[in-house]
Image (cartoon, helix red, strand yellow):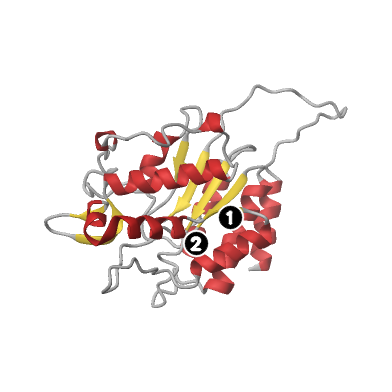
């Protein structure tokens, strides 16, 4: 992994535009709109009409950010930190990211799949190694990396206590963030506390529970809005974003604002 890390960093550095001309004079340029990129899995991803009412929290995040801070949601169903890289998705994002942008990274749900070598990573070794590729790649492009621990699933014990489901992955991400000096949004801890507060029955209103499906991993519109609100609040609290960058943090968001575009056709 160390060689790949260096290769990614060197390649990304080669694409950073020079800030000075040949004579050493800084060239002024108009202020460019910053973009917040999301790399992640199905809990954050854009959903389409054939999946409604399933909703990724990345679909709701723009409701809490100023209109001049667009969200580019590159999260994809079923991906891990490893498979996202191996499929070339990180490279594609780094080709778009510019200085001043943000790269928000949330993985672990699929990294945990021990039976699938194309996705599995071990928390304290390969998981951290792959996450470093996102960190190094963003920094090389002049963007700010932000790590988010994985949002919790809906699971309760017999006493009605919300139970963590992600094993060592959140702890490994927290340790990596501290080691690399990267801002951490502890969405795992915050979402677990929220599910505990809501309780066994009320949380069903936040997950993709329908007449035909009882999904304790993916969200419906209220759940996606609630998690996106956690993310936006943490971006502000950790000073990744300024007060002028966020909005509606304490306001109600109508479920009708969530829309599902038709699936892409080939």
SS at circle 2: helix
Residue drawn at x 39%, y 50% as measured from the top left: 44
Q: Which mark is residue 81?
A: 2
Distance of label 2 from label 1 (alpha carbons): 9 Å
Residue drawn at x 61%, y 38% as measured from the top left: 98
Residue 211: percent from left, percent from top: 11, 56
175 on left or right of 148: right
**Outermost residue, bottom side:** 115
Badge 2: residue crowd in 10 Å (few <14, some 14–19, many ≥20) = many
Residue 194 image-quadrant placement? bottom left
Q: Are marks 2 and 1 in contact (CB under 8 Å)?
A: yes
Q: Identify the residue under disc 1.
A: 134
14 on left or right of 125: right
Residue 148: percent from left, percent from top: 50, 55
Residue 6 image-quadrant placement? bottom right
Q: Which quarter of the rendering shows the C terminus?
A: top left
């Amino acid at each position: 992994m160390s060689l790949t890390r260096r290769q990614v960093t060197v390649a990304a550095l080669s694409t950073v535009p020079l800030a000075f001309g040949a004579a050493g004079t800084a060239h002024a340029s108009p202020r460019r709109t910053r973009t917040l990129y999301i790399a992640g899995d199905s809990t954050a991803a854009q959903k389409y009409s054939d999946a409604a009412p399933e909703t990724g929290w990345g679909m709701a995040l723009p409701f809490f950010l100023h209109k001049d801070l667009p969200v580019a949601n590159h999260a994809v169903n079923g991906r891990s930190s490893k498979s996202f890289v191996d499929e070339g998705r990180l490279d594609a994002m780094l080709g778009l990211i510019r200085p001043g942008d943000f790269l928000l990274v949330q993985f672990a749900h699929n990294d945990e799949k021990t039976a699938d070598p194309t996705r599995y990573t071990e928390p304290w070794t390969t998981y951290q190694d792959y996450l470093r590729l996102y960190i190094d790649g963003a920094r090389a492009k002049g963007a700010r990396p932000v790590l988010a621990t994985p949002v919790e699933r809906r699971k309760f014990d017999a006493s009605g206590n919300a139970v963590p489901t992600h094993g060592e992955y959140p702890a490994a991400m927290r340790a990596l963030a501290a080691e690399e000096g990267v801002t951490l949004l502890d969405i795992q801890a915050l979402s677990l506390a929220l599910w505990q507060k809501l309780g066994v029955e009320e949380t069903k209103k936040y997950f993709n529970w329908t007449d035909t499906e009882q999904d304790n991993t993916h969200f419906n519109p209220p759940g996606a809005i609630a998690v996106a609100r956690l993310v936006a609040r943490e971006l502000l609290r950790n000073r990744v974003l300024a007060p002028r960058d966020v909005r509606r943090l304490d306001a109600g968001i109508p479920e009708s604002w969530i829309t599902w575009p038709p699936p892409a056709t080939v």
